[in-house]
Image (cartoon, rainbow, N blue to C red):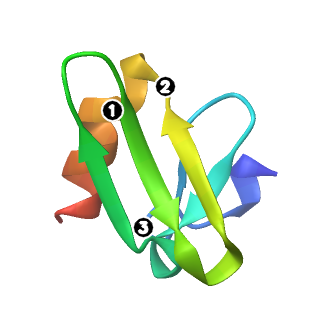
Amino acid sequence: MESILNPKNFFRISRQAIISDQAVTSASANLRNARVSLEKIGLDLPIARERAKEFHEWLGR
Protein backbone atom coordinates (compact mmCIF):
# COMPACT_ATOMS: atom_id res chain seq x y z
CA MET A 1 0.00 0.00 0.00
CA GLU A 2 2.70 2.48 1.00
CA SER A 3 4.50 2.06 -2.34
CA ILE A 4 1.48 3.28 -4.33
CA LEU A 5 0.82 6.39 -2.20
CA ASN A 6 2.45 9.73 -2.95
CA PRO A 7 5.01 10.42 -0.18
CA LYS A 8 4.27 14.14 -0.47
CA ASN A 9 0.73 13.48 0.77
CA PHE A 10 1.06 10.37 2.95
CA PHE A 11 3.38 9.40 5.80
CA ARG A 12 3.79 6.18 7.78
CA ILE A 13 3.73 7.25 11.45
CA SER A 14 3.99 3.68 12.76
CA ARG A 15 3.76 0.07 11.65
CA GLN A 16 -0.01 0.31 12.05
CA ALA A 17 -0.81 3.66 10.43
CA ILE A 18 -0.25 5.72 7.30
CA ILE A 19 -1.82 9.17 7.39
CA SER A 20 -2.66 11.89 4.89
CA ASP A 21 -1.37 15.42 5.36
CA GLN A 22 -4.95 16.62 4.74
CA ALA A 23 -6.19 14.69 7.79
CA VAL A 24 -3.70 16.13 10.30
CA THR A 25 -5.30 18.63 12.67
CA SER A 26 -2.37 18.98 15.07
CA ALA A 27 0.80 17.24 16.18
CA SER A 28 2.65 17.35 19.48
CA ALA A 29 5.84 15.93 20.92
CA ASN A 30 7.61 15.82 24.25
CA LEU A 31 10.48 13.82 25.71
CA ARG A 32 8.34 10.71 26.13
CA ASN A 33 6.18 10.53 23.02
CA ALA A 34 4.81 12.18 19.90
CA ARG A 35 1.19 12.16 18.79
CA VAL A 36 -0.87 13.34 15.86
CA SER A 37 -4.52 14.37 16.05
CA LEU A 38 -6.93 13.59 13.22
CA GLU A 39 -10.02 15.35 14.56
CA LYS A 40 -12.07 14.96 11.37
CA ILE A 41 -12.23 11.22 12.02
CA GLY A 42 -11.88 11.36 15.80
CA LEU A 43 -8.44 9.79 16.19
CA ASP A 44 -5.38 10.66 18.24
CA LEU A 45 -2.50 8.40 17.19
CA PRO A 46 1.01 7.83 18.50
CA ILE A 47 3.97 8.49 16.21
CA ALA A 48 6.76 5.92 16.39
CA ARG A 49 9.80 7.41 18.14
CA GLU A 50 12.08 6.56 15.24
CA ARG A 51 9.73 8.37 12.83
CA ALA A 52 8.90 11.47 14.91
CA LYS A 53 11.66 13.77 13.64
CA GLU A 54 11.08 12.81 10.01
CA PHE A 55 7.30 13.27 10.49
CA HIS A 56 7.70 16.83 11.81
CA GLU A 57 10.02 17.66 8.89
CA TRP A 58 7.48 16.19 6.44
CA LEU A 59 4.64 18.12 8.06
CA GLY A 60 6.54 21.42 8.03
CA ARG A 61 7.70 21.22 4.41
Q: Quadrant of the C terminus?
A: bottom left
- Which residue occupies the foreground of this view, 37 or 14? 37
**Distance from label 2 to label 1 (Cα)?**
6 Å
61 displayed left or right of 28: left
Q: First in sequence: mark 1 or mark 3? A: 3
Q: Mark 2, residues whose alpha carbon is within 10 Å: few (<14), some, or many (≥20)?
A: some
Q: Are marks 2 and 1 in contact (CB under 8 Å)?
A: yes
Q: First in sequence: mark 3 or mark 2? A: 3
- Which residue occupies the foreground of this view, 38 or 51? 38
* Residue at the spot of label 3: 8
Q: Disc 3 residue type?
A: Lys
Q: Disc 1 residue type?
A: Ala
Q: Mark 3, residues whose alpha carbon is within 10 Å: few (<14), some, or many (≥20)?
A: few
Please tell me whether mark 2 sits on a helix, a strand or a loop: loop
Whole-percent x and y of residue 31? 19, 18
Query: What label does residue 48 carry, if any?
Result: 2
Q: Is residue 5 above or below residue 40?
A: above
* Residue at the spot of label 1: 52
Q: Are marks 1 and 3 in contact (CB under 8 Å)?
A: no
Q: Is residue 9 above or below residue 17?
A: below
Mark 1 or 3: the one toward you: 1
Mark 3 or 2: the one toward you: 2
**Distance from label 1 to label 3 (Cα)?**
16 Å
Q: Is residue 15 above or below residue 29?
A: above
